[in-house]
Image (cartoon, rainbow, N blue to C red):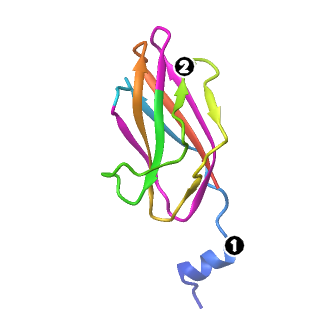
Amino acid sequence: MPLSWRQLASLLGPPGPMPPQVARLDSPQVNDRRILLRAPQALTISRFDAVLSGGTSPSVSFSLRQGADVSTSGTAVTTELLTVNSTTAGSASTSFQVPDIPAGHWLWLQVTAVSGNPVGLTVSIELQ
């Protein structure tokens, strides 16, 4: 008797951790918004890394936000802005005031300040 997809998936066990989600924002500008993902199930942010490329003494500050509707301001994942000013080691954060993303919610970043004309901003998010 052939198995349905649901039966086959149940034999494989629960889904494992998601691979890190990586996004790049070219020439970041104030008020740029980049949607990073839509949660297929309830997720928890465990780590966030960011690094800049190019520019002269570049710096980018942004807010990481989540919500059911990306046209709203959403809920801030951290109470303070995340700032990255490194083109080598980058910046990392493992402390989040609201790390949980409900199933079906979006996760995005909103750029709030830019200096030094960075060529790009790359972010990586680890989720559980």
Within the magenta stretch, is there residue 48? Answer: yes
Does 81 appear above or below 73?
Answer: above
- The image quadrant of residue 88 is top right
Does 7 appear above or below 75?
Answer: below
Please state which amino acid type lies under the numbered disc 1. Answer: Gly
User: How far apart in space, not on screen, are marks 1 and 2 (Cα)?
Assistant: 42 Å
- Say what secondary structure mark 1 lies in: loop
User: Seen in the image, is 26 located left or right of residue 10?
Assistant: left
Magenta residues, as a range?
31-60
The extreme bottom residue here reads: 1
Quarter the C terminus occupies: bottom right
> Along the polypeptide, which appears first: circle 1 or circle 2?
1
- The image quadrant of residue 25 is top left
Within the magenta stretch, is there residue 59? Answer: yes
Q: Residue at x 36, y 39 (%)?
A: 33
User: Seen in the image, is 94 located left or right of residue 81?
Assistant: right
Measured from the top left, where is residue 110 in percent x and y?
40, 38
Measured from the top left, where is residue 120 in percent x and y?
44, 24
User: Seen in the image, is 11 located left or right of residue 121?
Assistant: right
**Residue tagged by mark 1?**
13
Which numbered dot is residue 85? 2
- Say what secondary structure mark 2 lies in: loop
